[in-house]
Image: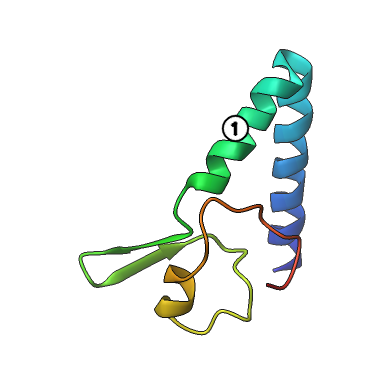
């Protein structure tokens, strides 16, 4: 699990660095703003729950996810 977390952080870091170097900060910021608008989770055919792996442990059920305000800045941890 720790290896997966490290890989995810590396991917995010590389996305930030490459986005800022190859293009510009404004384009990178546009992508992050777009990600903040996307749904946090989706239920496919009432059977498959797809979500970002970094959801807060304070979310206990689907209704908690539905009540999350969008767009929103994603915190580093917790609520």
Of all residues, the one furthest to the left in this rendering is: 45
User: Where does residue 43 sit, x and y in percent of width and height?
Assistant: 31, 65
Is 6 displayed left or right of 72 in the figure? right
Which residue lies at the image location 66% right of the left edge and 52% below the top edge?
73
Q: Is residue 43 above or below residue 62?
A: above
The image position of residue 49, as x and y in percent, is: 37, 68
Q: Quadrant of residue 26?
A: top right
Residue corresponding to mark 1: 31
Q: In terms of image quadrants, where is residue 27?
A: top right
| Residue 30 location (% of width, % of height) | 61, 29
- Find residue 19 and report its horizontal and vertical position in percent: 71, 24
Q: In the picture, which quadrant includes the N terminus?
A: bottom right
The residue lying furthest to the top in this view is 23
Q: How many marks?
A: 1
Residue pictured at 56% horizontal, 79% vertical:
59
In the image shown, does 22 or 60 lie closer to the viewer?
Answer: 60
């Amino acid at each position: 699990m720790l290896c997966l977390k490290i890989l995810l952080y590396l991917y995010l870091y590389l996305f930030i660095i490459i986005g800022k170097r190859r293009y510009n900060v404004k384009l990178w910021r546009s992508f992050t703003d777009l990600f903040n608008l996307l749904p946090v989770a989706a239920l496919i055919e009432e059977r498959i729950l797809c979500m970002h792996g970094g959801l807060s442990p304070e979310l206990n059920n689907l209704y908690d996810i539905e009540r999350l305000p969008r767009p929103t800045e994603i915190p580093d941890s917790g609520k």
